[in-house]
Image (cartoon, rainbow, N blue to C red):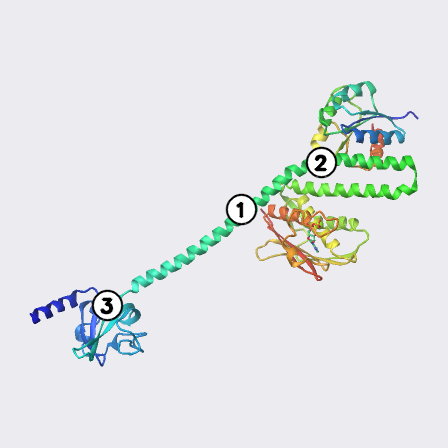
Amino acid sequence: MMENESRHLEQIFQLIPSGLFTVDTAQRITSWNRRAEEVTGYTVEEVIGKKCTIFTEYPCREYCGVFSKKIKKPITNKECTIKRNDGHLRIVLKNADLIKDENRTIIGAIESFEDITERKKAEAVLKRDKATLEMLVNKKTKELLAAVEKFNKVKRLSDIGALTAIIAHELRNPLAAIRTAAYNIKRKVQNPSLDSHLQNIEKKVLEADQIIDNVLIYSRIKPPQFEKAKLYNLLDECIATAKIRFPDCRISIRKICKTPKECFVEADQLQLKEVFSNILNNAYESFKKKKGGITIRSWFDKQGHFNISFEDKGVGIMPEDLKRTTEPFFTTKKNGVGLGLAICDQIVNLHNGNMKIESKVGKGTTVTITLPVSR
Amino acid sequence: MVSRKIMVVDDDKEFLEELKEMLIFSGYEVTGINDSTIALKVARVVKPDVILLDLRMRSTSGFEIANGLKSLIETSNIPVIAMTGYYTLKEHSWLINFCGIKRCLKKPFNPLDIIAEIEKVMETA
Ligand SMILES: Nc1ncnc2c1ncn2[C@@H]1O[C@H](COP(=O)(O)OP(=O)(O)O)[C@@H](O)[C@H]1O
Ligand SMILES: [Mg+2]
């Protein structure tokens, strides 16, 4: 009966699909099953009587929990590393408990372990894949949101586009009548006391006309007609126009060009003129005292893109306004329309370019346009 | 000097009134036409020296009128100056040229500019 039971136990000991071994109180190995041989590479003969540290690594080598009073027994699902007899490290998951005799005296310990190295590897890969996947999903989500935002903006633009174009045009007829009527009054009445009022009418008609122009340009921005645009000529024209536009400003313009004079960019000349003019206008308007300097720089960046920046030392833009400057109709100026930079932004985007606005209140503003040289 | 005959076609009644007044004051003889459908007929009768023509009108458009003028022997030599708040000379130049329109002024123009234009086209006519 006893013998039978013992044979039975031996059978279980050998057949169980986990590494299984026992040690005495001095941690010398007293038994060692087949699966333990497979996992560690050590045969029974090689380990019996040896200390179990012959194959244990971190953390069991420094600190074996089984015989420590502080650790609760049985120990279950503890992860540790072992070293096979061929030197390879394996990760195992182990359970361990003390063996006591009938007097409850500790006479040794029993430990079972399972090789989970492959599982750990798979988990690591999975974890990495999960992280990559999450990152990808995040990125795509962001892209999608950006696209939706862009779509909404474009949609808004096309809505105001169609309607404003009609309204803007229609407004020119009454303006024409008002302007001519004012002229007729002046000629007929010949009364100098009316002159200032009539001048105001004229001035406001022109202002309204300017607003209509801006709105129309904005609503009419079409896909660019690409041609080889000589930017220096364009720029010089815009500078000349700005000087005429602001006759009572004393602004010096400095050009620092690191790009050859003859270089060109595939772009819509009229549209780029619009961009340069608007940026220059803003720079001129940024000088409260109507005097100062504007620096225009050009260079090719590492990607070979054409860059041009307009730097003024004017009033600057408040941080909370900075991101709104390209919003249609955003303005902080008394007579502003708020379409200048919106137009620039649209045009630059249609050229697959980029517009960057940097500014510090009281220090000045730099607007940088980046354009691909060819489409 | 015989006074020059100007015909003005515009469907904006108040503008037409003011422009007519202004031109008369400047010494021209003026026929104002508010209803663009009769413009061609009137032009044949009046035989103006210059026609000032609004392009976008509710009924017959300025382009149609200009085309009609061009195709009739009696009117084909009358210089036409277009006035428009809608079409730009730059963008619509082919359309404007196609209809035989010599000059184009953008509304709201300075009244003095229209006189300069009138004198210019009559010089070359
Ligand atoms: N160079 C600049 N210096 C200071 N503020 C600027 C400059 N450029 C743009 N801004 C700010 O951005 C706003 C929007 O500019 P813009 O779209 O050109 O419209 P607007 O000039 O009609 O106000 C301006 O009202 C101003 O507050
Ligand atoms: Mg502006």
Alpha-carbon neighbours of circle 3 within 10 Å: few (<14), some, or many (≥20)?
A: some
Alpha-carbon neighbours of circle 1 within 10 Å: few (<14), some, or many (≥20)?
A: few
Task: Determine whether B69 is above or below A327 in the image.
Answer: above
* Depth order, front residue of A106/B15: A106
Q: Along the polypeptide, which appears first: circle 3 or circle 2?
A: 3
Q: Secondary structure at mark 3?
A: helix
Which residue corresponds to mark 1?
A148
Which residue corresponds to mark 3?
A39
Q: Tell me the residue at 38%/60% (across/down).
A: A127
Question: Marks 2 and 1: in contact by CB < 8 Å?
Answer: no
C-alpha span from label 1 to label 2: 31 Å
Residue flagged by tag 2: what amino acid is it? His
Let me know if residue B80 appears in the view: no
Q: Along the polypeptide, which appears first: circle 3 or circle 1?
A: 3
Residue flagged by tag 1: what amino acid is it? Val
Residue flagged by tag 3: what amino acid is it? Val
Which residue corresponds to mark 2?
A169
Alpha-carbon neighbours of circle 2 within 10 Å: few (<14), some, or many (≥20)?
A: some
Q: Secondary structure at mark 2?
A: helix
In the image, residue A244 lies at what x, y percent? 79, 49
Quadrant housing residue B112: top right
Q: Residue furthest left?
A: A1
* Depth order, front residue of A8/A281: A8
Q: Tell me the residue at 85%/43% (across/down).
A: A199
C-alpha span from label 3 to label 1: 56 Å
In the image, residue A70 lies at what x, y percent? 31, 78
- Disc 2 chain ID: A
Task: Determine whether A190 is above or below A316 in the image.
Answer: above
Specify whether disc 1 shares its chain with disc 2: yes
